Image (cartoon, rainbow, N blue to C red):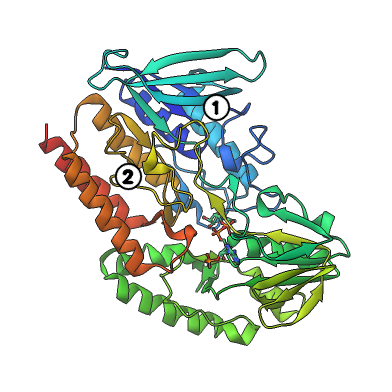
């Protein structure tokens, strides 16, 4: 069996390492930074973590833990990034594969190798790495490559850029770490995703004024409903067996009961259905709005020197704009022309069951999903399927069948979600696990 290359030792990469190791599949894992944990390693020296000092995950501990190593019960329902990074360290120690990760080693290119170079069925892939300390570049050939470099690290600024010019400071959420920099300033936070809400809440505690501008409303979900983490309700037996419309209806009723109308807090009522957008989870936002410490605004219309003019024609003086406008799906080591399935500037991804590039046998993408829930257990389930494929325990359908599944998935996104570059990777936490289980069964039958 060919040796496997795993790119990245964040939460998805380490899930792959664990599964490959347990199946006796040889692998090398390359990580640009000095430690594991990816996004969850605050101030990661790979430069790719978007974590801020106060970050706590917004899915519950039970939702995010790996099946092969549950999170300790003493951790809170919503652990901090410090606790999550420590849990990942313990996960790697527990499974004993730390010595297989080559730290401070950046993958600079992955290209299709000439047929036979790896001894595998396909030609395999030539993976070039650069040692960050010595600068030494090495190329090795692998039959299979698992790409797990994350999709929340490459900042996406507003597109197109807003007209006009701004005299103050502009920054993307990726670079935000602590609120002190906003002390006594007039801060404008753009977006209504999870970064925008967390950053606006923090800013509102120290700033002179905080504005939160958005181009549409969002159904703000609390972290707790009826005394339990909200995602315990969304993975309850009702959610397991009820159709999507019934889940949405009951969630809407529960939110209305517990939280009231969003317009009561000064937020625009969303024009989309409740599960038609990636959830924005925040308890604190509504309180900060109620305290009058955050002022809601519509989208920016234009930048105007010392301030900003909004879509409703109002103008405010602003010192700092924080663009919480999401991230690009980005693979700097893949040439866009050679790997079009993952190279769309609009985050469109064409992968069979969100993992397999039909035109590149042996190339797998891990954790390249955006669940209504946590990525970690899904990356673990994807890794089990990839291990089936690598070890020959499962086979894939034909290329046309895979492309038909991709087209059907894209169509399902179009019909369900608000059109946005942030809704190209969405999967249902439970439904996607079911899908992978069925795929593994079907794959085994194809051998
Ligand atoms: N505590 C946690 O666990 C946290 C998790 N996260 C996760 O990280 C990921 C990234 O989140 P986030 O950084 O919030 O990014 P998102 O992509 O989720 O949200 C981007 C926001 O910016 C808006 N936007 C994009 N472009 C423009 C524009 N040109 N003009 C106006 N608005 C614009 C989007 O609006 P539209 O919908 O119209 O496109 C959306 O409201 C998500 O998966 C999120 O759940 C983030 C922070 C904390």
Residue 69 or 181: which is nearer the viewer?
A: 181
Q: Is residue 147 above or below residue 407?
A: above
Residue 413 or 96: which is nearer the viewer?
A: 413
Locate residue 42, reporting x and y percent: 67, 41
Task: Specify whether residue 67 is in view.
Answer: no
Q: Residue at x 43, y 66 (%)?
A: 419
Q: Describe the element under mark 2 as helix, strand or loop.
A: loop
Q: Residue at x 84, y 61 (%)?
A: 167
Residue 218 or 108: which is nearer the viewer?
A: 108
Cα distance between the residues tagged 2 and 1 = 24 Å
Location of the C terminus by quadrant is top left
Q: Residue at x 63, y 26 (%)?
A: 34
Location of the N terminus by quadrant is top left
Q: Nearer the viewer, mark 2 or mark 1?
A: 2
Query: Would you say the residues marked 2 and 1 are in contact, meaning their CB atoms lie under 8 Å apart?
Result: no
Q: Answer with the quarter of the image where residue 217 lies.
A: bottom right
Q: Residue at x 50, y 74 (%)?
A: 226
Q: Answer with the quarter of the image where residue 357 lies.
A: top left
Locate residue 422 relative to residue 324 in the image: left or right. Answer: left
Q: Answer with the quarter of the image where residue 373 lies.
A: bottom left
Image quarter where ligand 1 lies: bottom right
Q: Which residue does the numbered mark 1 point to in the structure image? A: 31
Locate residue 270, reporting x and y percent: 51, 79
Check mark 2 vs ligand 1: CB closer than 8 Å? yes or no.
Answer: no
Locate residue 236, reporting x and y percent: 35, 65
Which mark is drawn over residue 351?
2
Task: Specify whether residue 32 is in view.
Answer: yes
Q: Describe the element under mark 1 as helix, strand or loop.
A: loop
Q: Is residue 26 above or below residue 352?
A: above
């Amino acid at each position: 069996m060919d040796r496997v290359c795993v790119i990245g030792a964040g939460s998805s990469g380490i899930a792959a390492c664990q599964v490959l190791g347990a199946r006796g599949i040889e692998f090398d894992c390359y990580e640009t930074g000095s430690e594991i944990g990816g996004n969850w390693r605050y101030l990661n020296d790979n430069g790719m973590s978007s974590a801020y000092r106060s970050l706590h995950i917004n899915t519950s501990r039970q939702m995010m833990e790996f099946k092969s190593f549950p999170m300790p019960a003493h951790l809170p329902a919503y652990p901090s990034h410090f606790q999550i990074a420590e849990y990942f360290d313990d996960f790697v120690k527990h499974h004993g594969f730390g010595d297989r990760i080559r730290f401070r080693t950046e993958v600079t290119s992955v290209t299709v190798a000439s047929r036979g170079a790896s001894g595998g069925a396909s030609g395999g892939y030539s993976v070039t790495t650069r040692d960050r300390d010595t600068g030494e570049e090495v190329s090795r050939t692998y039959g299979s490559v698992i790409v797990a470099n994350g999709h929340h690290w490459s900042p996406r600024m507003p597109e197109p850029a807003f007209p006009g010019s701004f005299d103050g400071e502009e920054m993307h959420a990726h670079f935000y770490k602590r609120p002190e920099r906003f002390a006594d300033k007039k801060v404008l936070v753009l977006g209504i995703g999870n970064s925008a809400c967390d950053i606006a809440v923090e800013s509102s505690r120290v700033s002179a004024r905080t504005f939160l501008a958005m181009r549409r409303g969002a159904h703000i979900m609390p972290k707790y409903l009826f005394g339990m983490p909200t995602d315990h309700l969304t993975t309850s037996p009702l959610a397991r067996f009820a159709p999507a419309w019934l889940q949405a209806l009951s969630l809407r009723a529960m939110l209305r009961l517990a939280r009231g109308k969003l317009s009561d807090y000064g937020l625009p009522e969303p024009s989309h259905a409740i599960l038609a957008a990636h959830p924005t989870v925040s308890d604190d936002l509504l309180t900060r709005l109620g305290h009058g410490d955050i002022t809601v605004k519509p989208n920016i219309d234009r930048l105007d020197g010392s301030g900003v003019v909004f879509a409703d024609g109002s103008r405010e003086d602003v010192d700092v704009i924080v663009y919480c406008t999401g991230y690009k799906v980005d693979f700097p080591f893949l040439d866009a022309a050679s790997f079009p399935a993952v190279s769309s500037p609009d985050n469109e991804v064409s992968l069979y069951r969100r993992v397999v590039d039909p035109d590149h046998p042996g190339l797998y993408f891990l954790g390249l999903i955006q669940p209504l829930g946590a990525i970690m257990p899904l990356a673990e389930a994807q890794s089990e399927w990839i291990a089936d494929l690598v070890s020959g325990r499962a086979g894939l359908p034909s290329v046309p069948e895979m492309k038909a599944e991709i087209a059907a998935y894209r169509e399902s996104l179009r019909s369900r979600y608000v059109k946005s570059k942030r809704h190209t990777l969405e999967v249902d936490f439970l439904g996607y696990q079911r899908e992978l289980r069925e795929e593994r069964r079907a794959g085994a039958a194809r051998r």
